[in-house]
Amino acid sequence: EAGVTQFPSHSVIEKGQTVTLRCDPISGHDNLYWYRRVMGKEIKFLLHFVKESKQDESGMPNNRFLAERTGGTYSTLKVQPAELEDSGVYFCASRKGVAGGSYNEQFFGPGTRLTVL
Amino acid sequence: AQSVTQPDIHITVSEGASLELRCNYSYGATPYLFWYVQSPGQGLQLLLKYFSGDTLVQGIKGFEAEFKRSQSSFNLRKPSVHWSDAAEYFCAVGARSNDYKLSFGAGTTVTVRA
């Protein structure tokens, strides 16, 4: 079974440009999470999808960030326009939903390292 | 609000020596606690988790962690470190009420010397 994949692995862009990050969750996983780690800081939650719906986007830093999950499969995270402080590693994780809300593991992708110059 | 503190940014340990990584959490109820490891070029891998019950939990790769409610701690240990344990380790807390979104500590980088 394939794990969570993220594309690209590394992106270098100029300030003011647009970048789109993609996450492909494990097949059948309804829950998809985005996290971000700014250099030297902790990994922080950005948002959570259940299927195609945004369940919680309380961690999104501002309206330059737009996340979508059309059809409830893969997700994209667009940053437009990118600023210097957006540099960091963006992680995606997926989790299979369980009836009754019991826990099961979040599986993480390798991350996308974004550098804004 | 939930939060996690990992006091040690970097630890160097000799191969074969024991390792302990510290983690303190803040959460209003009984938390779900996790330790993840990230090796270079890899995603975060779950080492172990604690929900309830026995406060000493065993994980993969020979790691264990102990939940101490009175100290709000969940320290990770390994009796004998292997060179392949060199990585970055993250403590995290989650809750069912938050759909298990995780709050992470800043991470501890472990260097293993021969």
Image (tube, coloured by chain):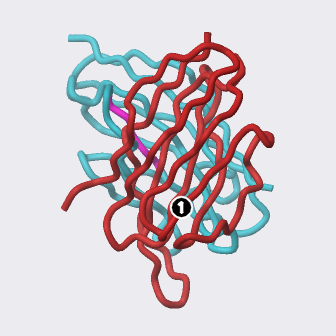
Chain colours: A red, B cyan
Above or below — where is A20 with respect to B60?
above
What percent of the width, then of the height, locates residue B88? 42, 29
The residue pinned by badge 1 equals A69
Task: Name the magenta segment's main secondary structure.
Answer: strand
Chain under disc 1: A
- The residue depicted at 25 percent of the width and 33 percent of the height is B80
Q: Residue furthest front?
A: A17
The residue drawn where x is 80% and y is 40% is A62
Between A59 and B55, the one lying in front of the other is A59
Q: Which residues are magenta?
A: B35-39
Task: Give the residue at x 37% y 38%.
Answer: A110
Position of A11 with respect to B69 (left or right) is left
Q: Residue furthest bottom?
A: A100
Disc 1 crowd, CA 10 A, few/some/many (<14, 14-19, 20+): many
SS assignment at label 1: loop
- Is residue A117 located in the magenta-colored stretch of the structure? no
**Quadrant of the rendering where the N terminus of chain A is positioned:** bottom left
Residue A27, by quadrant, is: bottom left
Answer with the quarter of the image where residue A25 lies.
Answer: bottom left
Name which residue type carries label 1. Arg
Could you tell whether B110 is left or right of B106 in the image? left
